[in-house]
Amino acid sequence: MEQITIREIAKLCGVGVSTVSRAINDHPDINDATKQLVMETIRKYNYVPNNSARNLKRSDSNTIAVLIKGITNPFFADMIQVLEREVTGRKYSFVLQHVEEFEDEVDVALLLEKEKRLKGIVFLGGISNRTGEKLSLLGVPYVISTVEAGFGEETAMVAVDNEKESRRMVEYLLSCGHEKIALLAAKKDDASIGMLRHRGYRTALEKSGRDYDEELVMWTRDESLTYTMENGYALAKELLESGREFTCIYAISDSMAIGACKALFDAGKRVPEDYSVAGFDGLDLAKYYEPSITTVRQPRKEMAEATIRLLFDMIEQKPVRMRQLFEAQMVPGKSTRIRKKGK
Amino acid sequence: MEQITIREIAKLCGVGVSTVSRAINDHPDINDATKQLVMETIRKYNYVPNNSARNLKRSDSNTIAVLIKGITNPFFADMIQVLEREVTGRKYSFVLQHVEEFEDEVDVALLLEKEKRLKGIVFLGGISNRTGEKLSLLGVPYVISTVEAGFGEETAMVAVDNEKESRRMVEYLLSCGHEKIALLAAKKDDASIGMLRHRGYRTALEKSGRDYDEELVMWTRDESLTYTMENGYALAKELLESGREFTCIYAISDSMAIGACKALFDAGKRVPEDYSVAGFDGLDLAKYYEPSITTVRQPRKEMAEATIRLLFDMIEQKPVRMRQLFEAQMVPGKSTRIRKKGK
DNA sequence: TTGTATGCGTTATCAC
DNA sequence: GTGATAACGCATACAA
């Protein structure tokens, strides 16, 4: 496969390479007729400029990259839509970069920054305190979205207060009369939102004078993926089979909550009559599920918009508020019930 | 931000650039001590090689790209996992490329091929007859996965027979005693799997001597996204409000089926007692939903594995079967019931 | 308005 | 083993 280059197009048209380049890049000072000719031969020979060469030569490129760990997570789905819309709407190119589970997102960012001459970077999920240190090596503005790790004040961040919102949920469940609330938690050594949501659970119990009972906390196994229906199912099943007493299951994600419901149904239990179930995130699915899942809705679209706004403000060197915490919304569904004293 | 280059690393180490290059790329003929020194300074100065320059210079790169239109589609989620595992397991690099709704996936492929010196390409979804023509411009092997458009025999393809499987579903529903089966369909001008599933629906009815009733076909509006819960909800709601008679809703995707269930619940109906609901695809969600959704399960992981196997066989110039159709599996759930004659 | 020449950062081919 | 140096394909400063 002999690659056709700009030089050959130039030869074919009987012009210089710079003229072809000008045609491609919509430069102003070029004769309209020659431009037509060039564009036509390009189409005719299906010439495609080599992006590596372009990126290498260009000093800037007006592209924003969004790095996502777990691109298949439904939580990110509509955020991606919004991010893309907002970026392209500002006449910037949009690059969506998937980061594999075992990869370091900052390393990927560093690579991509050089490769594509990025103007800005968005980290969607993923980043933890550990990887955070290398962030300072980034040469362009970046915003960490949906995760509020313990970075400094100088790190741009858009998220909800996971601990607070988790606490809010547990307080709601307590107010419904549930005393024994089981938690479907992340892995025990989680250092990100899983930890924060667990902490919120614990704080809510303790602040209200209840005991925090480690027995009712179901930690995700090391080999499992945390935020999945499958995991919710497995954890709830294990909980049921342990014989421990509880009236309510609080799962740290909606997907896990749905898995938990299935485990209850399979055991012949009803939701919410026998057990209440609550989730976190406010996915569409929580609304469409039957019974609809009681959840805490993160304002995903607003957060996505704020993320891009913040990023561009940084790019344009405007004064910004670096840490933007959004308020989540308690969404009671049909999966939880109010429990009278005694029963 | 002054970018640090290979030349500066060379100067810093007091060696030539080629030595640094050799260190980076694990070349055999280099002294171990100098290699250590080079690697250390690289780490120390956080040098990251510029990928554009590498891609430009390299003649081959051992990377496979997977292009996905609608990367947030849950149908693709576990397929991506498998594709990634299979590719990296073969010591190839894996590039996941998101294609925007309005973009032409073949154009993107053409660009990427030159930019990254690809060894092979996988198209996951998306490709239609229209874009298919330009496929021949691709200089490397490619496989089209999960969509069986009407390409020629020479196009590598892995998919299920959508028309046949759709027909199978409708025949199952007919065998359950449903006579008036409404269809939640794709857009009317769909030229891909949406069209095929509709055709299977129609054929099943006609082959069994029933009338095909256009009144019972709910086409997705132009402005809506087809395969979503939201769309299923809207179409089912419209159907209900039209007052048309039916006993079963067949949605061409599981997500739409779940949306349809919600519309029925909201209208005070029960599933499956009042109306049966069926979907297509066999998502995990169909299993976890309550009631579990009757569906046709596509063997996603097997298809993903076959896709990579086929691609690598092509790369290695082995003889291959270019068109691989997989058998789907009818999965009866609790969302459909058997209807006795009369009522 | 157009063409020529230079360099972007890297790898690979040579000599040494 | 190692170091110059020539490409890779393109954009652009500068000359024409």
Image: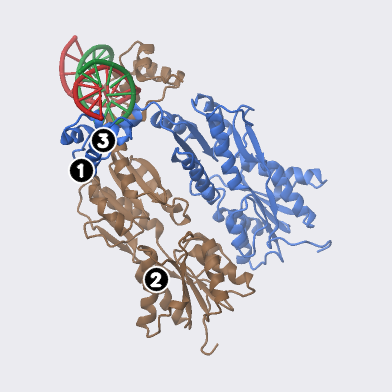
Chain colours: A brown, B blue, C green, D red
Residue pictured at 53% horizontal, 25% vertical: B136
Q: Quick one: which residue is furthest to the bottom in this view? A: A342
Residue at mark 2 to residue at mark 1: CA–CA distance: 39 Å
Q: Chain of mark 2?
A: A
| Quarter of the picture holding the C terminus of chain A | bottom right
Q: Quick one: A328 or B72, which is closer to the camera?
A: B72
Secondary structure of residue under mark 3: loop
Q: Which mark is residue A68?
A: none
Which of discs 3 and 1 lies nearer the camera? The answer is 1
Image coordinates of residue A134 in percent, x first then y, are 26, 51
Number of residues whose C-alpha sits closer than 10 Å to that of mark 2, classed few (under 14), some (14–19) or many (20 or more): many
Circle 1 — which element?
Answer: loop
In-image side of A100 versus B123 (left or right)? left
Which of labels 2 and 3 is toward the front?
A: 2
Q: Quadrant of residue A213?
A: bottom left
Whether residues under marks 3 and 1 lie with C-beta atoms below 8 angstroms apart, the answer is no
Q: Position of residue B120 (x, y in %)?
A: 49, 32
Q: Which image quadrant is residue A266 in?
A: bottom right
Q: Which mark is residue A198?
A: 2
| Residue A343 in view here | yes
Q: Look at mark 3 in the image and give the residue it sits on.
A: A60
Q: CA distance from mark 2 to mark 3?
A: 43 Å
Crowdedness of circle 1 by 10 Å Cα count: few (<14), some, many (20+)?
few
Q: Position of residue B83 (x, y in %)?
A: 51, 43
**Which numbered disc flags the more N-terminal residue, 2 or 3?**
3
In the image, is residue D4 above or below residue A122?
A: above
Residue A296 drawn above or below residue A29: below
The one of B173 and A180 positioned closer to us in this rendering: A180
Q: Position of residue A203 (x, y in %)?
A: 36, 77
Seen in the picture, residue B249 relative to A212 is either above or below; the reply is above
Disc 1 target residue: B45
